[in-house]
Image (cartoon, rainbow, N blue to C red):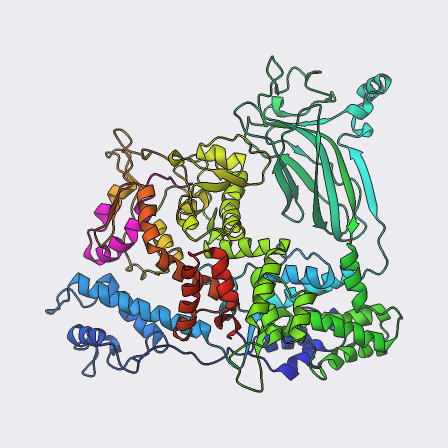
Amino acid sequence: MIRFDQEAFDGHGPAMTSRCSRLAPGASGRLAFALLLLAGLAPGASSRAADTLEPRLKTYLDTHCVVCHGADSPKSDFRIDTLSPRIGLEDTPQWLEVMERISSGEMPPPDYKQRPGSQESTEIVELLSARMKEGEAARLAARGRVSYNRLSREEYVNTVRDLIGVQYNATDPGGFLEDPEWRGLERIGSVMTLSPSQIEKYLAAAEVVLAEAYPSKKPPLLEFTKRAIIEKQIDPPHRERLNALGLIDKVRYEMWPGDLYRYSGSEPLPEAGIYEISYTLSGLKPENGRAPRLFVYESKLDRVLHEEDVVAPEDQPVTVTFQAHLPKGRPDILVINQVPGPSNNPRSGRHGRTPFLSTKEGRIPWQMKLTDEQGRPRYPFLILDSVSFRGPIVTAEEQRRREEYFPSEPGNMDQVRAGLGRLARRAFRRPAAPGELEAYVGIVRDELAAGEPFAEALKAGMLAILCSKSFLFVTEGDEHEDRTTLNDWEIASRLSYLLWSTMPDDELLLLAEQGKLRDQKERARQLARMLADPRARRFSDSFAGQWLQLRNVGKFPPDKKLYPDYDSSLEKAMVEEPRAFFQEVLHEGLTLREFIDSDWSMLNARLAKFYGLPETGLTGSAVQRVSLSAESHRGGLLTQAAILSLTSDGTRHRPVHRGKWVSEAILGRVPPPPPANVDPIEPNPVDAPKATLRMKLEAHIHDARCASCHSKIDPLGLAFENFDAIGRWREEETVEGTGSNPRVNSAGQFPDGRRYETPEEFKGLMLGHLDDFQAAFIEKLACYGLRRTMSFDDRDELKEIAAAGRADDYRLRSILEAFVVSDLFVKR
């Protein structure tokens, strides 16, 4: 949360001077803009940090540490007795050093006479770690009179689309950087820093958006359909033969696994915008094999435009249609049949000069055979018939928005003021302050006085609005008074960015103007309305993705030799499962128990096959609800492949990391950091008897420094030993070495003595921690919604939300409603 000088930034400051749309990178105007945006952090932090050390910590330090690091000749010039008792808020580097030295066993030194026991030191490390985390949360939750929370990359794209009807592709080369995260959350205001390079990207993005919204002349509508293979691509002898037979328009393009088609973009696109692209094709799937996968990729943009499995008979092709935002000019689109198969390198994997008409007509003798003697497909392959383009497409709503901001009479300054006022009100999510609008109108006047065309002058004023901190940041608070709660405009933004990841719509802005959003019943009504809107899927995707840390799936790509079945198609289905699962729990009125264990999940054919489940009734790439048998070994989040794989290193599963994930995401307990310089678990030697990773881990943690923490973390991860690094079920672990592969042992015991033998029994025990899970879930939801960490001051409101959830049987929708209508929701 960053503080700024409102007048300097939103007035005629150097960043917003006329001709701002043409300032070169590095110019003084942009430098000043960057300096203003990078103004200091808001001061102040509240915490329960005491003015004196906790008794057991003080006793430990006095007994074992102060004798060497006290007032009398402190060793290494390091004194502990003078460190601030406000651990996590003051003297943080020094306290971190103390914690790490105790954790590693380096201090007190081995020859020290009164050396503490390992359990005593472990408890002190846990205490210090907990206080450091509380201090960190307090610092991140600190807010001054005004808080500025930068829009995330996703929020910026959605907001621009809703504001002015332009799809900005922020992830294209040269686009926005990935947002920083804190414990998985990518929208915590105090960690969403802003660098000068990002300022340049915001300015460039605004220029691109305005150029597309208001082109110098209206682009023509491009609309064409072409055969996959056009006549001039066919060799003359075959062309003449096919013309004579009346078959020239029946030539098709066959695509075996890994094959690609390069001829989609035959026409240059008249202007940047949304284009509707269609492919008419057949997809032949071998019995018990993979479906062919249509994968459409724009190579210059390094962007996947569309992908889906296609199954359609050769004589009954289907049309796959999708929309994509593309720049002006000729696109470089590759269509790939993205499934594994025989290598395309030999001669048999090439296209010949003889045109392909059908599998019945056959192929050239030296080419790869796509069907067997009975005409059944040997491999998953596509047969492409035609390609269509239409665009650029602008909806009536998008055009209306653009016209609202642009004067119908060039040079009419009253219309300029009205249009910029409408843009500023929606962009800033509040009415423009007195005198604020005049600054933007003044930019237009200055541009006109400099001889700029009216349209360009107006776009300069609009650019200033799109580069204002009031647009780029969700602003809360008041420069002129201390205010702890939100006003109605701020509540509208909090609601819309929570549920839709975008700016408030007209209804929310109207309710804010009428002062109705402070009313709990009105917020409940708005929650119901907004969840019924298709945009609410963004909440399920975004919150579930951040809570579960799904951005880490595929972070370490699985080794192709060890896991040949793993590919981008499977990874996409794996990530979609927990997101769609969350959506189903929310919209079907289900409880938090489903996240721990369930008799259903959200699968497509690819994921069902991976799980060893029936593919019956599963068509296409979209996931759908599937009932699970007791023998499926699935159900809930914990045994989903995405969750099991995101903690792996690409070669083997990591039970400790799995346990840490369960501790943090499900129980809300962040373990202390491991001791420094702990040797990693080495792979099994090829000449040694085979041993599971668990066997090696159990030998590894006999070290007293490790045992105490591992006794709490490991039982949460060892329950999933039956699942390998990519989440496949197994009965034995495949490892190098001599002898047979060892059987998997998924049994475990909690520190309190409770035991489990299987993953199912573990999930049963976890259901006994439902209150802990709900508390952790609510805190994560609150951090996500409020864009800050929770502090000690929020504990009462969090307990009230938990009580409301418990009263309705831990129903997810009820928890979300309790949060939205709570006092915490309207608290800064």
- Is residue 709 a member of the stretch shown in magenta? yes
In the picture shown, does residue 588 fall above or below 186? Answer: above
x then y, percent, for residue 56: 20, 73
Relative placement, left or right, of 702 versus 396 is left
Q: Residue at x 47, y 44 (%)?
A: 557
Relative placement, left or right, of 363 versus 66 is right
Q: Residue 464: in sight, yes or no?
A: no
In the picture shown, does residue 622 fall above or below 667? Answer: above
Start-end of magenta stretch: 698-725
Relative placement, left or right, of 3 versus 219 is left
Choose between 502 and 495: the one closer to the eye: 495
x then y, percent, for residue 207: 73, 64
x then y, percent, for residue 354: 73, 20
Which corner quadrant of the image does residue 314 belong to?
top right
Query: Looking at the magenta stretch, what is its main secondary structure?
Result: helix
Q: Residue 349: in sight, yes or no?
A: yes
